[in-house]
Image (spheres, grey):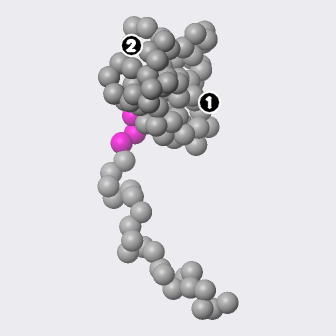
């Protein structure tokens, strides 16, 4: 990306999303991995004031400290297979029954 929408020096954009909610999810994933991350709106676009979440006015970014950018990008590059998701067959309803109490 050619222009960084954040005024602080030392931050790097690792993701651009349509809307702040998607950026928050990505930032949360990075934070869960120990990476300091922030979700921010595109400066000066004004979309956040009107609830606009599409187009340039809805652009949001995930930023991380420059020193952590490579690690963050590596984490975001990991693709998860559907097999990695929770499988209902692995859940044992009997394990959490209140009848045993």
24 vs 75, nearest the viewer:
24
Q: Residue at x 58, y 10 (%)?
A: 7
Give the percent coordinates (x, y) of residue 62: 49, 26
Task: Give the image quarter of residue 78.
Answer: top left
Work out how far the residue at label 1 is from the one at label 2, CA to CA, in angstroms.
20 Å
Decide: is 1 above or below 38: above
In the rendered image, the vertical position of residue 2 relative to residue 53, given as above or below:
above
Q: Position of residue 55 (x, y in %)?
A: 32, 22
Asked if residue 21 is positioned above or below residue 12 in the image, the reply reads below
Is residue 62 shown in magenta? no
Residue 85, percent across and down?
A: 39, 58
Residue extending furthest toward the bottom: 100
Label 1: how many Cα within 10 Å (few below 14, some 14–19, many 20+): some
Residue at 59% x, 33% y is 35
Instruction: Decide if residue 11 is on the left or right side of residue 58.
Output: right
Disc 2 is placed on an element classified as: loop
Q: Residues within 10 Å of mark 2 (few under 14, many from 20)?
A: few
Residue at the location (48% across, 12% down)? 44
The answer to whether any part of residue 14 appears in the image is no
Q: Choose between 81 and 19: the one closer to the eye.
A: 19
> Magenta region: which residues?
75-79
Residue 77 lies in the magenta stretch: yes
Q: Earlier in the sequence, mark 1 or mark 2?
A: 2
Looking at the rendered structure, the secondary structure element under dot 1 is: loop
Give the residue at mark 1: 36
On the image, the x and y values in percent for residue 70 come to 50, 24
The residue beneath circle 2 is: 1
Dominant SS of magenta comes to helix
């Amino acid at each position: 990306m050619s222009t960084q929408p954040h005024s602080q020096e030392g931050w790097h954009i690792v993701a651009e999303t349509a809307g702040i909610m998607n950026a928050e999810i990505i930032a949360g994933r990075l934070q869960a991995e120990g990476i300091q991350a922030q979700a921010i709106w595109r400066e000066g676009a004004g979309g956040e004031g009107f609830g606009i979440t599409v187009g340039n006015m809805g652009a949001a970014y995930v930023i991380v400290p420059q020193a952590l950018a490579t690690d963050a990008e590596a984490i975001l590059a990991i693709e998860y297979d559907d097999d990695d998701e929770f499988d209902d067959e692995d859940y044992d309803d009997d394990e959490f029954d209140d009848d045993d109490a």
